[in-house]
Amino acid sequence: MPFVDTNILLYAICPGERDRSKAQQAREILRRDDLILSVQVLQEFYVQATRPTRIQPLSHDEASALIGLWLRFPVVEMSVALMQSALRFKERHKTSYWDAAILAAAASAGCAELYSEDLNPGQTYDGVRVVNPFS
């Protein structure tokens, strides 16, 4: 089961022509029934999707409703153990803490793939291979 990073969720709500191809691909990914998310991914989605400086920000109710739909997927919860694992990922792989937390969540869920455009596509981090679905 692939783990989905925040950027997939954000592209799924992109309006307009600029990122139309990515938006379509993201929506197609989210039609699957075998994905895994984390609390962090859902939190990041909410913050970015509703920020006032975003072009066409979502309302609280719209973002909350989407999060409710995505709760059909298994969600990795935050814990002290996951944070400690993220700190080890950060040190070992020299990533940002937030990327390390995504990688740690994916690894803890047993995911072999992480769909993201934020990390090095094709690189494997402790058994989790990054796949950029937009390339």
Image: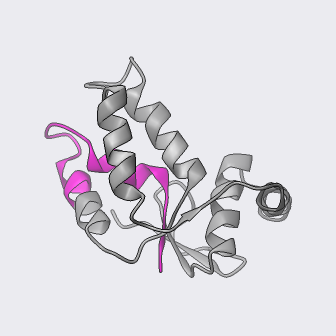
Location of the C terminus (image quadrant): bottom left
In this picture the colour scheme is one colour
Residue 34: x %, y % from top left: 39, 77
Residue 26: x %, y % from top left: 29, 59
Q: In this view, does 92 lie to the left or right of 45?
A: right
Relative to 131, does residue 45 appear above or below in the rendering?
above
Residue 101: x %, y % from top left: 69, 56
Which residue is located at x 39 percent, y 17 percent?
Answer: 52
Residue 37 in view here: yes
Residue 31: x %, y % from top left: 25, 68
In the depicted view, which residue is nearer to us: 48 or 59? 59
State the image quarter where residue 50 is shown.
Answer: top left
Residue 74 magenta: no
Q: Is residue 24 left or right of residue 33?
A: left
State the image quarter where residue 132 is shown.
Answer: bottom left
State the image quarter where residue 95 is shown.
Answer: bottom right
In the depicted view, which residue is nearer to us: 94 or 88? 88
Magenta-colored span? 1-24
Which residue is located at x 19 percent, y 37 percent?
Answer: 15
Q: In this view, does 120 lie to the left or right of 54?
A: right
Residue 19 magenta: yes
